[in-house]
Every structure is written in structure tokens, then in C-alpha cells.
Amino acid sequence: MQNDGQNAKHKRAMEKQKAAVDASIAAASTERGIAVLLTGDGKGKTSSAFGMVMRALGYGQKVGVVQFIKGVQLSGEEHYLRDHCPDVDFYQMGTGFTWDTQDRTTDIEAAERTWAHAVGMLENPDFDLVVLDELTYMLAFKYLPAATILEAIKNRPPQQSVVVTGRGGGSELRGIMDTVSEVKDIEHAYRAGIQARKGVDY
């Protein structure tokens, strides 16, 4: 059981924590859209981005999603958006993974077509949230000019938020983002020979 001393110590700690939180909230006076980069070798980057999609939809916001790399194998998020969220502007590159296509020329052509859809969203103030899933690979493989991508993200409408996912992306991309979260790979079921799980991995 908790004694009076423990309760008093806990109360003092929580009061101190609340004061720090309140001060941080009061200091955040700028109201605008934010740029978020979800990167790292661990699992969960796309899952986190789609969590933000669901959050934005809960507030009736307009959402656009562009998926680079993916598109050959159907995913749960694609099923859900197409069946239940027809107002979400959803576009996929549709070529699958680069190690499957093994054709740089056609990959670049597909990347350019896909980027054109992304630019249309990034220039449209009607979109509250734009998700650019796996965009970092377009930079890593030099399928798209880095300067073009960075300028489009920086020059988007002030109230629009953008989420970029994927491993890497480079220091220049990190440098223009407001929030950068790195998902660390500690353990993965795949390395233990466990197959990817529908509803969890895709």
C-alpha cells in the first residue's frame, strides 16, 4: 500500500511535470501545418502515417496519399481507403519494389508520373494532410531530383501538413522537416522465419 510520504512525493513530481508541460504548450504559439519524417530501419513507419490519416479523417479533413514503391500486392490500408474512404485522394506508383522490377528506366518513368500526383496535392490548399509513403527511396535511388522534392515540400500551402516515410532520405530532407522520428529495428519476426502477417505487416 502507498503511504502518505509516497503519495506526497508522487504529487510533487506530477505538479512539476504538469508545470513543464503547461509551459511547453504556452510556448508553442505558431499555428501552421507541419512536415513529419518517419524514417529508420524498424517496422511501423507506414503504419504510423496511416494512423495520422485516420486521425485527420476523424476531424473531417481532406487527405491525400501517394505511395511510392508499393502497389503490386494489395495492402490492408489500400483495401480500407478504397472501400470506406472514397474522398481520400489515393495514388500508387504501382511498380512494386525496385528489386522486383530491376529496370531503372521504367522505375524513373513511374516515379515521375507518381510525383506529378504528389505535386498536385502539395500545391492544393484544399488538402489538410498529404502522406508521401516511401518517398525517401526516390531520393536514395536518385529517381527524382532532390531539389524538386525539397522545394515542393517547403513551398506547400501554410496550413497543409505533410508526412514522408521511408528509410534514409538524407540530411537535406531531415533539415526541412519539423518533426523527425526514427523507428529502430531491435527484433523482427521475419528473421525468425515467420511469414508476413496480413493485417499486421500488410
Image (cartoon, rainbow, N blue to C red):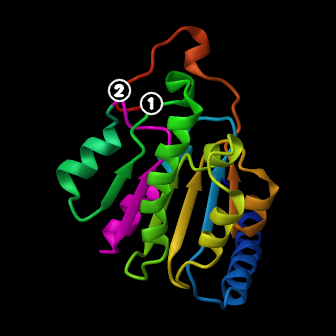
Between 110 and 29, the residue placed more toward the observer is 110
Between 183 and 113, the one nearer to me in the picture: 113
Which amino acid lies under the numbered mark 1 shown in the image of this protein? Asp
Q: Tag on residue 68?
A: none
Which residue is pictured at 38% across the width and 63% down the height?
64
Question: Does the rendering let one see residue 109?
Answer: yes
Percent x, y of residue 67: 45, 48
Q: Residue at x 55, y 28 (%)?
A: 103
Neighbor class of circle 2 (other Cα within 10 Å; few <14, some 14-19, many 20+) is: few
Crowding at mark 1 (Cα within 10 Å: few <14, some 14-19, many 20+): few
Above or below — where is 75 with respect to 126? above
The residue at which mark 1 appears reads as: 201
Residue 173: percent from the left, percent from the top? 73, 60
Q: Position of residue 147 (x, y in %)?
A: 71, 64
Residue furthest toward the front?
105
Q: Amino acid at mark 2?
A: Lys
2 and 1 marks in contact (CB < 8 Å): yes
Q: Which residues are magenta?
A: 49-73
Going 57% across and 84% down the picture, which residue do you hit?
A: 32
- Secondary structure under tag 2 reads loop
